[in-house]
Amino acid sequence: MKEKHDVVDKRHLRSIKTKQKLLEAAKEVFLEEGFQKATISQMIKKAGIGYGTAYVHFEGKEEILMVLMDDVMEKFYEIAEVSFFPKTKEEARQIILSQATAFLKMAETERSMMRLFEQAIGISPSIATKWKAIREKFIQRISQDIAFAQKNGLARAKLNHTLVAKGWFFTNEMYLWEIVRNEQQGTVEEIAQTMTAVYTEGLYP
Amino acid sequence: MKEKHDVVDKRHLRSIKTKQKLLEAAKEVFLEEGFQKATISQMIKKAGIGYGTAYVHFEGKEEILMVLMDDVMEKFYEIAEVSFFPKTKEEARQIILSQATAFLKMAETERSMMRLFEQAIGISPSIATKWKAIREKFIQRISQDIAFAQKNGLARAKLNHTLVAKGWFFTNEMYLWEIVRNEQQGTVEEIAQTMTAVYTEGLYP
DNA sequence: CAATAAATATGACATGGTGTCAATATTATA
DNA sequence: TATAATATTGACACCATGTCATATTTATTG
């Protein structure tokens, strides 16, 4: 006798496959058309399923994109997790630089998805919330790092660490979008280096 | 005999008044409903004009908001124009601080309009372009100021002034939106002071 | 192995917004 | 007054959305 929890119902399997077909088709349509212009009709046509079926699996375009964004999100969270225990200003600079570089590199490797994301953030509150969570995560993390450096006498103690963290992340984020849009001048490395230089000199005496 | 260029045609006047009525109604609807939910039907109803009339005067929602944004835009441009000829690091800090404060104050005084603007930027490319122009203006201006300070030996010369300018503006801009959304912690003054402290310490040796 | 139940898929339909355009009304000019 | 130019209008065609009664497929029961 087969174990219930290991085997998937034949019909549940059908459901999963339909959902998968839709997700794949949706991704193509999103990338071809952008978030606004993409329609459910295009997706279901490409997936070879019925119109109403899309609404069985998702509440609408937004939710479909939310799911598609999940693995990109995961990568951002990984970057945010990097540990930070510098003993010198120079060590701090290096850690910060490499984290900033990794962050900005995401814009290049995930450009097409991030482009979609940017459009969607402006349109869909639920997707905006998703991005906001990432922002919070980074800010909280950076804030913590600054507090650590301040306790160790490395960073200027009079500065409000939360405000500094926000400011630093904001610069990173805006550059991220700029790179996503392909509007930046210079390489990611150059940008990261310049940003980091001003920031570390500003924060560490 | 009346001068042609001084007198407005009676019918042209009618046109202008209709347009004006529409703009006023549109502003109300936009503020009540937000950019997305606002519809032409609501606006023409409130303005007491016919549906097609809206499309005679504007190409659509976007263009209406563009016009409504113009005076806010003007104020931003004024802030960008402040002259910058510091002779000491401290003098620079003060000028930068007051400009940053003025910039962030805009978020408070024009909150409702800026909120609309933020939504619209995500949705309408033409409005995004309008904002981008402001951003360019500021960045160009800041960039110039940094170059000036570098020439006078006030600012670290090795830094790419355009990249630094962007980074600095980006922090300002993101805080602006945060304040617009009413999500900020602390007062505008606090934020401006902290941002400016890190920035000037980072840029000026 | 029916018969019945449960889960899944479907597309026609109602709704609501957009932008257009032929017709109408108003104002200017001959 | 007749005619031309300008401005306004709302009905209409179009398109996307989300819902729902119906159909189809799979599971279970006696």
Image (spheres, coloured by chain):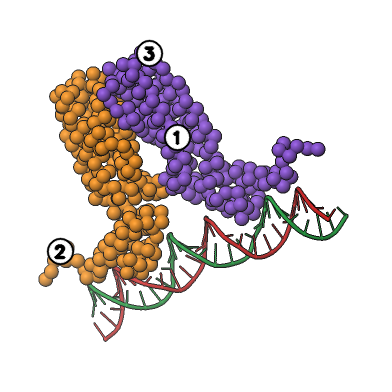
Chain colours: A purple, B orange, C green, D red
Question: Distance from label 2 to label 3 (Cα)?
Answer: 74 Å
Q: Residue at x 24, y 41 (%)?
A: B105
Q: Looking at the image, is mark 1 or mark 2 nearer the viewer?
A: 1
Q: Chain of mark 1?
A: A
* One can see residue B54 in this view: no
User: Is A116 on the left-hand or right-hand side of B65?
Assistant: right
Residue carrying label 3: A87
Q: CA distance from mark 3 to mark 1?
A: 27 Å
Q: Nearer the viewer, mark 2 or mark 3?
A: 3
Image side of residue A11 versus residue A155, left or right = right
Q: Amino acid at mark 1?
A: Ile
Left or right, A174 with reference to B192: right
- Above or below: residue B179 compared with residue A49: above
Q: Which residue is mark 2?
A: B6
Separation of disc 1 and disc 2 at Cα? 58 Å
- Location of residue B142 with respect to B76 vertically, above or below: above
Q: Which quarter shows the N terminus of chain A?
A: top right
Q: Residue at x 39, y 60 (%)?
A: B39
Residue A172 at x, y percent in the picture = 38, 30
Which of the pair B196/B133 is nearer the observer? B196
Q: Quadrant of residue B87?
A: top left
